Image (cartoon, rainbow, N blue to C red):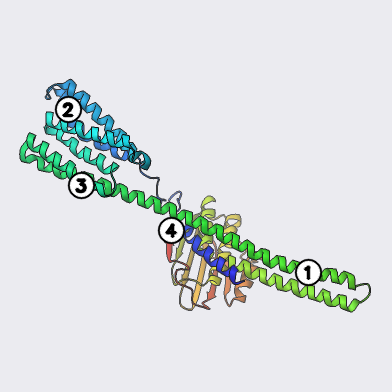
């Protein structure tokens, strides 16, 4: 049973990421959206609007050799778009063809900026964006300084001291783009790693739990089979001995039932957060607005498991019998007692005679020193109040404080 409890503890830790995982809401319910997909090259395309000034000069005839400028502008945009989408694929980003295209873009930028000046110098910050998106590692700093210095030389040749802004914009666009994209990649890699570790932990927990049950049931059933065979052999000639074997079978069966219950109870430990999420989803699917509030110290595994069963039963009753439009679930705790209150605004269910489900829960809570009181709300609706004493200190982090409202 010790190995089963260890497996259960690992399972609780593995499920923490699910309990913390944001879920999408519906209707007026407030929700925290899950992280979206990784960024793509489209995030770099709006910056091409910086070249509208150059395009305007071409149409207004303010640029010499407009056909050469138009071809250069088209080539620059094409190379930039190519690099923008290559930057988000690691293998493509590090390929030789990508480096060749980046070098070509740099030469084209120098040619256009030196030939036309003015708003055409804004191609240097765009070149910085491309460099920051493609280059990673130690080479980024020297390359960023080199591109900025090149912008300063060409800008100084065309516009004098006005090129200072171009140099600053080029260096800033290079470093900031690289930092943001590197951080985005790290965040998504960490999220993928966390999910993979959680899946591996869950699979490991299932395997260990199945092994424990196999060992437990295999041993117990083997004993029962052996004693049943002995009973069959002894019954014709020694009834008292056969009855003794039957008594042993009964004792083994009771012990096995106790051990299985302990194993299953351990496996269900810490299920309150999961049951709260399931209740919110169930009630939301039935069109019932739900408010879930939780505060107080961490709960013990036994308390969390018992309150999880109460939440599960009451949520089912609200959906099946109440006809409610709103439901509130509140968990509060002190150093001495933990209280769960579930209230709906429906027509009530079982106010006179609680169902077998609530009766069974009341018995289970009473056995643990607690209480469960169902009853009608004075105006309308139904309320179930469950209380349990704090019998032991819960380990830190078993259950986080949280508040979720529609």
* Residue 399 in view (yes/no): yes
Residue at the (52%, 54%) spot, across then down: 281
Disc number for residue 224: 1
Can you say whether 19 is above or below 103 in the image? below
Q: Which structural element holds mark 4? A: loop
Q: CA distance from mark 1 to mark 3?
A: 77 Å
Residue at the (14%, 23%) spot, across then down: 60
Can you say whether 106 is above or below 393 in the image? above
Percent coordinates x, y for residue 157 in the rendering: 7, 35
- In the image, 262 versus 331, the foreground residue is 262
* Quadrant in which the C terminus appears: bottom left
Mark 1 or mark 3, which is nearer to you? Answer: 3
Q: Determine whether label 3 and label 4 are within 8 Å by CB.
A: no
> What residue is disc 3 on?
142
Q: Earlier in the sequence, mark 2 or mark 1?
A: 2
| Residue 262 falls in image quadrant | bottom right
Local crowd at mark 1 within 10 Å, few (<14), some, or many (≥20)? many
Q: CA distance from mark 3 to mark 4?
A: 51 Å
Percent coordinates x, y for residue 73 in the rendering: 21, 28
> What residue is disc 4 on?
405
Mark 1 or mark 4, which is nearer to you? Answer: 1
Percent coordinates x, y for residue 227 in the rendering: 81, 71
Q: Earlier in the sequence, mark 3 or mark 4?
A: 3
Q: CA distance from mark 1 to mark 4?
A: 52 Å
Q: CA distance from mark 2 to mark 3?
A: 34 Å
Q: Earlier in the sequence, mark 1 or mark 3?
A: 3
Disc number for residue 56: 2
Percent coordinates x, y for residue 351 in the rendering: 61, 65
Local crowd at mark 4 within 10 Å, few (<14), some, or many (≥20)? some
Q: Which structural element holds mark 3? A: helix
């Amino acid at each position: 049973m010790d190995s089963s409890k260890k497996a259960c503890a690992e399972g609780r830790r593995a499920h923490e990421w699910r309990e913390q995982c944001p879920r999408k809401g519906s209707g007026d319910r407030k929700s925290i959206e899950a992280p979206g997909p990784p960024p793509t090259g489209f995030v770099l395309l709006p910056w091409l609007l910086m070249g509208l000034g150059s395009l305007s000069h071409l149409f207004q005839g303010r640029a010499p050799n407009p056909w050469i400028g138009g071809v250069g502008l088209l080539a620059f945009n094409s190379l930039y778009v190519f690099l923008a989408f290559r930057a988000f694929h690691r293998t493509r980003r590090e390929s030789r063809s990508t480096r060749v295209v980046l070098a070509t873009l740099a030469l084209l930028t120098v040619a256009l900026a030196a030939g036309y000046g003015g708003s055409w110098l804004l191609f240097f910050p765009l070149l910085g964006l491309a460099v920051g998106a493609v280059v990673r590692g130690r080479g980024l700093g020297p390359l960023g300084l080199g591109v900025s210095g090149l912008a300063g030389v060409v800008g100084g040749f065309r516009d004098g001291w006005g090129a200072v802004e171009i140099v600053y914009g080029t260096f800033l666009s290079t470093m900031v783009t690289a930092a943001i994209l590197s951080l985005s990649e790290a965040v998504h890699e960490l999220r993928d790693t966390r999910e993979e570790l959680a899946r591996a932990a869950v699979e490991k927990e299932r395997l260990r739990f199945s092994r424990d049950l196999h060992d437990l049931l295999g041993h117990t059933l083997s004993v029962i089979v052996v004693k049943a065979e002995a009973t069959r052999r002894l019954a014709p000639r020694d009834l008292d001995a056969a009855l003794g074997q039957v008594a042993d079978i009964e004792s083994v069966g009771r012990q096995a039932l106790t051990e299985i219950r302990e194993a299953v109870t351990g496996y269900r430990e810490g299920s309150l957060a999961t049951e709260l999420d399931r209740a919110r989803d169930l009630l939301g699917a039935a069109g019932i607005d739900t408010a879930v509030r939780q505060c107080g110290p961490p709960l013990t595994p036994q308390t969390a498991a018992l309150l999880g069963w109460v939440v599960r039963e009451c949520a089912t009753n609200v959906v099946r019998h109440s006809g409610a439009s709103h439901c509130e679930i509140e968990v509060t705790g002190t150093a001495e007692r933990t209280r769960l209150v579930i209230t709906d605004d429906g027509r009530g269910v079982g106010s006179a005679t609680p169902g077998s489900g609530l009766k069974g829960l009341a018995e289970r809570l009473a056995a643990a020193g607690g209480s469960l009181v169902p009853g009608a709300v004075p105006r309308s609706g139904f309320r179930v109040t469950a209380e349990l004493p704090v019998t032991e200190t819960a380990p830190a982090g078993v259950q986080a404080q949280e508040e979720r409202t529609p």
